[in-house]
Image: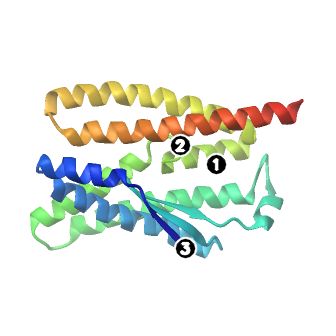
């Protein structure tokens, strides 16, 4: 398994340290790793080996090795692979939810309990935002792929991702103004970086579809 570290994480570390929020950031990053283990475990049981792991400023991302036979088994307009991807995408948020619920009922100091529950709920909600390639976006794309096919699912998910990012930017701008919290600003930047990268990939994929349709 290959491991890659996005150097932007050091910028985030410095900014959170200078704003006295480094402890919160490290706690969230720790549970992001646990969250990602949910994906890895689900992939393992579905026969999808982890090929690459990237440590990003907003958490971890993984790449799973695809089995050719999963592409040959059709489910409506999609394949078995898409169904497996949906299950893997759900596994991360599900694990975060389980951790939050378990710690809610543990007899431990209230401060620790609050930090763990808050961190995992935040990770859960963040990852369920339907922006590709967050878990919510992957789940949405997988469902649309099976129902509508590859091209239509990509178009719809790309449109939804951009609309949601505009709405989130407005909400984040208002939140930063009122709460003076740099974390909100950094999360918004991270999401825009993801969205712009996916927009570039989307345009390239649409060009390929146009060539194949000719």
Residue highlighted by disc 3: 1
Is residue 47 among what the camera can see? yes
Residue 24 is situated, as x and y percent measured from the top left of the image, at: 19, 56
Q: Are marks 3 and 1 in contact (CB under 8 Å)?
A: no
Q: Is residue 172 above or below residue 96?
A: above
Q: Residue at x 44, y 47 (%)?
A: 128
For the residues labelled 2 and 3, the Cα–Cα distance comes to 23 Å
SS class of the residue under badge 2? loop
Q: Is residue 5 above or below residue 194?
A: below
If you read the primary sequence from the N terminus, does the residue marked by circle 2 or circle 1 appear first? 2
SS class of the residue under badge 1? helix
Q: Nearer the viewer, residue 109 or 26?
A: 26
Q: Quadrant of the N terminus?
A: bottom right
The crowding category of the residue bearing disc 3, from other C-alpha atoms within 10 Å (few below 14, some 14 to 19, many at least 20), is few
Q: Residue at x 37, y 68 (%)?
A: 34
Residue 20, numbered circle: none
Q: Nearer the viewer, residue 54 or 89?
A: 54
Question: Residue 93 is drawn in which quadrant?
Answer: bottom left
Q: Residue at x 15, y 33 (%)?
A: 179
Residue highlighted by disc 1: 142
Q: Are marks 2 and 1 in contact (CB under 8 Å)?
A: no
Q: Residue at x 60, y 65 (%)?
A: 64
For the residues labelled 2 and 1, the Cα–Cα distance comes to 11 Å
SS class of the residue under badge 3? loop
Eye-nearest disc, 2 or 3: 3
């Amino acid at each position: 398994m290959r491991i890659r570290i996005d150097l932007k994480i050091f910028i985030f570390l410095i900014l959170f340290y200078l704003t006295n929020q480094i402890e919160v950031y490290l706690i969230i990053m720790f549970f992001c790793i646990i969250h990602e283990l949910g994906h890895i475990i689900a992939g393992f049981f579905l026969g999808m080996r982890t090929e690459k792991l990237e440590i990003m400023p907003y958490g971890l991302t993984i790449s799973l090795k695809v089995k050719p036979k999963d592409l040959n088994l059709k489910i409506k307009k999609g394949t078995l692979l898409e169904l497996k991807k949906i299950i893997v995408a759900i596994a991360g948020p599900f694990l975060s939810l389980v951790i939050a619920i378990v710690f809610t009922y543990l007899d431990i100091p209230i401060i620790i309990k609050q930090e763990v529950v808050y961190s995992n709920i935040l990770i859960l909600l963040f990852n369920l935002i339907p922006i590709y390639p967050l878990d919510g976006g992957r789940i949405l794309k997988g469902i649309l792929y099976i129902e509508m096919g590859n091209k239509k699912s990509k178009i719809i998910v790309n449109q939804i991702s951009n609309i949601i990012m505009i709405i989130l930017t407005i909400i984040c701008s208002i939140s930063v103004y009122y709460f003076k919290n740099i974390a909100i600003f950094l999360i918004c930047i991270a999401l825009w970086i993801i969205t712009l990268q996916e927009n570039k990939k989307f345009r390239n994929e649409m060009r390929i579809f146009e060539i194949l349709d000719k």
